[in-house]
Amino acid sequence: MIYKRILLLLFTVCLYFPTISAEGGNPVSDSVVLSYTGKAVVIESFKQNSDLYLQPVAASLLTAQEVKDFNLVNIKEITSLTPNLFIPDYGSKMTSPVYIRGIGSHRNAPSVGLYVDGVPYFDRSAFDFNISDIDRVEVLRGPQGTIYGRNTMGGIINVFTKSPFKYAGTNVSLSAGNYNNYSGGVSHYGNVDNKIGYALSGNYMHSGGYFQNTTVGKKADPIDAVSMRTRLSWRIRPRLSAHLILAYEYSDQNGYPYRVLHKETGEVDPVNYNEPSFFRRNMSTNGLNIEYVTDAYKLSSQSSFQFFNGTQGLDQDFSPKDLYFVDFYQRQQMYSQEFNVKSLKEDSRYHWQFGLFGFHQNYYQTNDTDNRTTGGHTIQSAHNPTTGFAAYHQSTVNDLFIRNLSLILGVRYDRERAKLTMDRIKPAETEPTVYGKASFSQFTPKGSLQYSFSKDGMAYFSVSRGYKTGGFNNTAETEEDRIFDPEHSWSYEVGAKSGFWGKLLFVDMSLFYINWNDQQISQTKPSGQGFVIKNAGKSVSKGVELSVMLNPVKNVSLQAAYGYTSAKYKDHKDYNAKTEATTVYDGNYLPMVPRHTLSVAANYVLHIPWVWLDNITFNAQYAGAGKLYWTDKNDYTQPYYGQYNGKISFAKDNFSIGLWAKNITGKEYISYYFSTSGGHYVQKGKPFTFGVNLNVKF
């Protein structure tokens, strides 16, 4: 049934072309002059060319208009909108597991990289942030280690904010919805003589929560969050420019609406635990980009600093009984510096790029487990400073042997050193301080052959090495579990992209095969409480991705994105020292990896020559994912599920009002599952929601 549904929906496909509305600023132009040569080009990223569709990589793009039309609020909501991308809702901002093509992690360092305006986000506790007033989101699938480095085995998510050289004006937005959801934002973009640009934005969001905690008689998951962003751009000289970005976000969230699951019957209890659980986070992210551009090359410097601290309180038994409560605190300071130089001569057969990257991540955490049945506390603290260095290069040779055939070769060397200082205090006992040191290094090469068979068409084949660094288990109870090793992969990909009949149709298809060793797996500790990271033997992921975009008639656009992934363990065994038993998972599917992801969207703009209205925009979307397994044992699954979303917008001059709805059919599904020695727990997906957006531009 699922295959028939997917095939039927894939025949209904289309291209979405953005329409100008009252939100997001007044577009100054589609491009901006960036270089001394006076050429107008679309603003590009720090390392990659501006047009993703001309690169030998599987990539998807979400524009600012699509973020608005799909009513996306945070980075988690882009799940399934691009093929084989899945971000489960963990229950709070504390962690955001990201999976691409079966590669991901939900308990240790991410396997998919995140960059915002060139600033790297190293920790998953920083991933969930407000994406209002962004210019675009790019998703690059497959290993990106040659250019981006550590922890990008699955791919990269690049987020870009709006440039004051591209947008101008003041924007005010208000939103209200059921479940006491309210938000408001204001932003201003301007520039002086097209030399100094400035952007200021602020946003406040309140959610009353979706799920009732029956024990305390209140919602389990309300949240308040405020975010601010400042961007300053200065064209110091015709060849020299600088961009400063400052961002801050604070959130106060009651979360974790977990329910007890009775696996034998499949029944799920209401949320009913006695101690409210929460996560509060302060996060500041800052970046300074300096660019020097000549006719032959561009030299760039990216300096970054990110700070966050988070406090978690968790009723760990998730029951009306007063058994366990955990207080967790984490703090990170991350500094990074990158230099990049790349050639710019478009008429040259040879293009090159060199880069140097360095970082220091200072991470601290403390964990206080309160056993309220005995009155004893177990307090554990860990300090993990990590320093790393990398050098990389990429060369492109065009017209290799025959016209339109290109060869791309790249290599990167990463080296980092990590330290551990860990203290644990148990009831009536203080353990000796544990010290640890570890170093990791790796070469990550990549090679691609690309053939361009038309102005907007190409085919490619690529081979790339993936690498994810090792680290420490801060909660390990035995010395052999203290350190886990890096994981490695080889990824093979063949793909083709082509436009047809001008802008009428665009097709993007890729097939991939990933073989990786020493996969980092989360396993329950021998004590039955908590988890540690261990290395499995071998795993394989293979699949296909298809994006089709169509603009059949004026003002009508359609698009579809489908991904299929089959990710299995080839060699994975779990030895339990407490029971002296070994569980074999060979042949099982990897957890949290949906077999199918599917997104279909349609957009229609109706222009009305009325005095009080300019146009009405209709947007409809379907997004689905599944089947997926939640555990290594494959003993609990989430079948394929889909949600229908929609929005109708009315616009007049600088004012617009939008009526939106999500999960219109009220589809029930499990968004997260986990188990401990105390039982099995699930979190349900969000129910049917609706609301209204108001946008005014000055």
Image: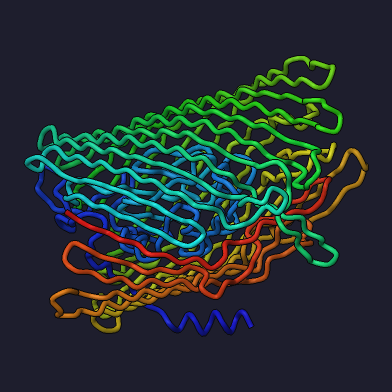
Which residue is pictured at 69% across the width and 35% down the height? 484
Residue 398, given in percent of the width and then of the height, sits at: 29, 56
Viewer-closest of 74 and 296 = 74
Quarter holding the N terminus? bottom right
Q: Is residue 194 left or right of residue 128?
A: left
Q: Measured from the top left, where is residue 123 in percent x and y?
A: 53, 38
Identify the residue at image location x=14%, y=48%: 33
Which image quadrant is residue 428 in?
top right
Asked if one can make out residue 52 in the rendered structure from this viewpoint, the answer is yes
**Location of residue 514 by image quarter:** bottom right
Q: Residue at x 47, y 80 (%)?
A: 10
Q: In this picture, is 145 found above or below 174?
A: above
Q: How many marks?
A: 0
Query: Which residue is at the front of the view, 223 or 630?
Result: 223
Residue 327 is left or right of residue 299, and the answer is right
Answer whether residue 401 is visible to the viewer in this image: no
- In this rendering, is residue 539 above or below 509? above
Above or below, 12 against 599 in this view is below
- Front residue of 367/149: it is 367
* Depth order, front residue of 682/550: 682
The image shows residue 670 at horizontal and vertical percentages of 66, 62
Residue at 32%, 34% (x, y): give it: 246
Question: Farthest left residue?
Answer: 193
Q: For residue 693, which quarter of the picture?
A: bottom left
